Amino acid sequence: MKKLLIVLGVLFTFAASTMAQNLKFAHVNAQAVIMQLPARADAEKQLQAFAKQLEDELGIMSQEFENKYKEYMAKVQDKENPMSDLKRQTVEKELQELQARVEGFRNSAPTEIQKKEQELLNPLVKQVQDAIQELGAEEGYIYIFDVNTFLYVNETQSVDVTNKIKTKVGID
């Protein structure tokens, strides 16, 4: 019985070490690949144009508020032709609503820019992820780790496939 346990223990250790030797691990710097994609520059230009468009719209809205406020102040200070209380209240309400719209736009613009960035970058991320999965299947890797998402990657125990992924996505 004791010999059987020893034999089973040796066989288990041998099988585990043989299995571990056949495992293939790789790592990639996916962020570096995405940053070098030709479409990345175009996405960045589109994002900057979108941000500029929002900035311009905010400028127009702010200018509209300023103009209406100056007009209101001029009418309020006009002693010869005073504004009725009803008219003053109506204009003040309009100014408050316009100011609220400007502030709402100003507050929502960063969120809209983030959404646009995700919309533009998601296809690039997917392209790199697909290339990683394809390479993993072709070359029989068990795992391909992204060096940007792990605190530690032992690069001597895994293969750097960043250049292979760059080739797959069309980066020279």
Image: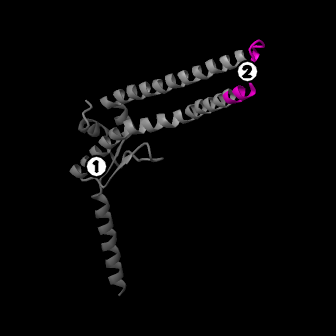
Examine the structure image and report whether residue 84 is included in the region drawn in magenta.
yes
Tell me, for residue 133, which label it has, or none: 1
User: What's under tag 2, amino acid-wise?
Assistant: Met
For discs 1 and 2, the disc positioned in front in the rendered view:
2
Quarter of the picture containing the N terminus is bottom left
Q: Residues within 10 Å of mark 2 (few under 14, many from 20)?
A: some
Q: In the shown orientation, is residue 69 left or right of residue 142? A: right
> Can residue 29 be seen from the camera position used here?
no
Q: From this viewpoint, which residue is outermost toward the bottom?
A: 1
Locate residue 2, reporting x and y percent: 37, 85
| Residue corresponding to mark 2 | 83
User: What's under tag 1, amino acid-wise?
Assistant: Gln
Residue at 26% over, 39% down: 164
Q: In the shown orientation, is residue 30 left or right of residue 93? A: left
Q: Nearer the viewer, residue 121 or 28?
A: 121
Locate residue 96, reporting x and y percent: 66, 31
Upstream in sequence: badge 1 or badge 2: 2
Q: Nearer the viewer, residue 31 or 80?
A: 80
Locate residue 116, reporting x and y percent: 42, 35
Q: Nearer the viewer, residue 30 or 17?
A: 30
Q: Which residues are magenta?
A: 76-90
Q: In the shown orientation, is residue 87 left or right of residue 38? A: right
Residue at 28% over, 49% down: 133
Examine the structure image and report whether residue 31 is included in the region drawn in magenta.
no
Residue at 34% over, 48% down: 158
**Residue 73 sits in which quadrant?**
top right
Given contact means CB atoms under 8 Å apart, are the residues at marks 1 and 2 in contact? no
Kindly report the distance in space between the C-alpha atoms of the residues bearing marks 1 and 2.
Answer: 71 Å
Q: From this viewpoint, which residue is outermost toward the left?
A: 138
Is 13 placed above or below 141 here? Answer: below
Is 67 placed above or below 15 here? Answer: above
Is 8 placed above or below 121 here? Answer: below
